[in-house]
Amino acid sequence: MSQSAKDRSKFKFRLYGAGDAQNSAQAVANLTALCRAYLKDRHAIEVVNVFREPKRALADGILMTPTLVKLAPSPAPKRIVGTLSQTQPVLQALGLETLAT
């Protein structure tokens, strides 16, 4: 795959949150803003409420919220726990630091 084709790959994220908890809402807002800024039209975000789907969260090994899981592209999965408020470390953890330059 050429570099330009790779840059256009769809990024898929799953964010596990605890209902309307402030830190979960903040993580959703921060991830949405990050994706709009760095992955415009190249991302999909699935939000999983662990109160509504506790068995799914346990099956996926989610023990804390909010937890972000990068599903695609490879290498995946990557996990980040927290509100995602520090953009640079989040980009670095997801392997997106080259997009911030």
Image (cartoon, rainbow, N blue to C red):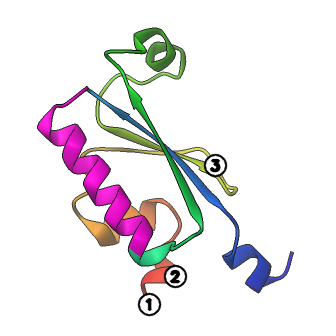
Instruction: Measuring from the top left, give residue 101's x and y in whole percent.
Output: 44, 90
Three-letter amino acid code of the residue under disc 3: Ala
Instruction: Measuring from the top left, give residue 16's x and y in whole percent.
Output: 38, 33
For label 1, the SS is loop
Q: Residue furthest bottom?
A: 101
User: Looking at the image, is 79 positioned above or below residue 96?
Assistant: above
Is the N terminus in the top left, top right, bottom left or bottom right quadrant? bottom right
Q: Residue furthest right?
A: 1
For label 2, the SS is helix
Q: How many marks?
A: 3
Q: Are marks 1 and 2 in contact (CB under 8 Å)?
A: yes
Region in magenta: 19-36
User: Which residue position holds label 3?
Assistant: 76
Numbered mark located on residue 98 in the image:
2
For label 3, the SS is loop
Q: Residue furthest top?
A: 55
Numbered mark located on residue 11 in the image:
none
User: Which residue position holds label 1?
Assistant: 101
Would you say the magenta stretch is mainly helix, strand or loop? helix
Residue at image location 30% in from the left, 27% down from the top: 64
Looking at marks 1 and 3 on the same chain, the residue that comes earlier in the sequence is marked by 3
Q: What distance separates the C-alpha of mark 3 from that of mark 2?
A: 17 Å
